[in-house]
Image: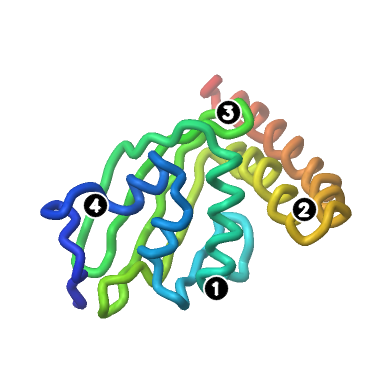
Amino acid sequence: MARSRHNWSVIGEHPFHTAWRTRDLDAWMQALAPDVVLRSPVLGAPFTGRAAAREVYGVLFEAFGAVDVTGELRDGASHAFYWTGELAGHRIEGSDLLRYDAGGMISEVVVMIRPLTGIGVFVSAVGPALAARRSPLRGLLVSVLIWPLRALLAVADVVSMRLLGLG
């Protein structure tokens, strides 16, 4: 396994922590490889490259309130961060799996979110804002298209908990 050239425990706070604490987009971009791949919890196709990452994280840093890292795991060229975040008045949980290239740059970020209703919150808060960066009409169209998804996930959550005797 490739070893990261960065020893975050020696030099201080990991850039992931710093990025979410400071929302310093330029500093976060410096930690990412030029050809970084971002895998969304919603879309099948990844975002590729720093320009795409800048756009995505610009929206994320604006949309999220407080984000607290609740745990970390590291193994060679991989580092997982577990977090809770405030988004559109809701608390959601997630994990970001970071993979490093041979030079120690972050080459891949895989994001997962829970609970299922959190996906609805995430997509309705982030999707329209990201699409609106292309055009206001695209932002509006994404808002209209995802509204039924968020409503369906919220209803499914309540009904499923009742059917399973959990709530």
Label 4 crowding class (10 Å Cα cut-off): few <14, some 14-19, many 20+?
few
Q: Give the residue number, with chain letter if any, for mark 2.
A: 132
Q: Give the residue number, with chain letter if any, for mark 4.
A: 73
State the image quarter where residue 56 is shown: bottom right
Dot 1 falls on a residue whose secondary structure is: strand
Dot 2 falls on a residue whose secondary structure is: helix
The chosen color scheme is: rainbow
Please name the amino acid that badge 4 sits on: Leu
Please name the amino acid that badge 2 sits on: Ala
- Give the residue at x 74% y 48%: 128
Please name the amino acid that badge 3 sits on: His
Label 2 crowding class (10 Å Cα cut-off): few <14, some 14-19, many 20+?
some
Spatial CA distance of label 2 from label 3 is 22 Å
In primary-sequence order, the first of circles 3 and 4 is: 4
Instruction: Identify the mark at residue 48; answer none if there is no mark.
Output: 1
Is 97 positioned to the left or the right of 12 in the image?
right
In primary-sequence order, the first of circles 3 and 1 is: 1
Spatial CA distance of label 4 from label 1 is 24 Å
Spatial CA distance of label 3 from label 1 is 28 Å
- Give the residue at x 54% y 23%: 165
- Residue 29 x, y percent position in the rendering: 44, 62
Is label 2 in contact with label 3 (beta carbons under 8 Å)?
Answer: no
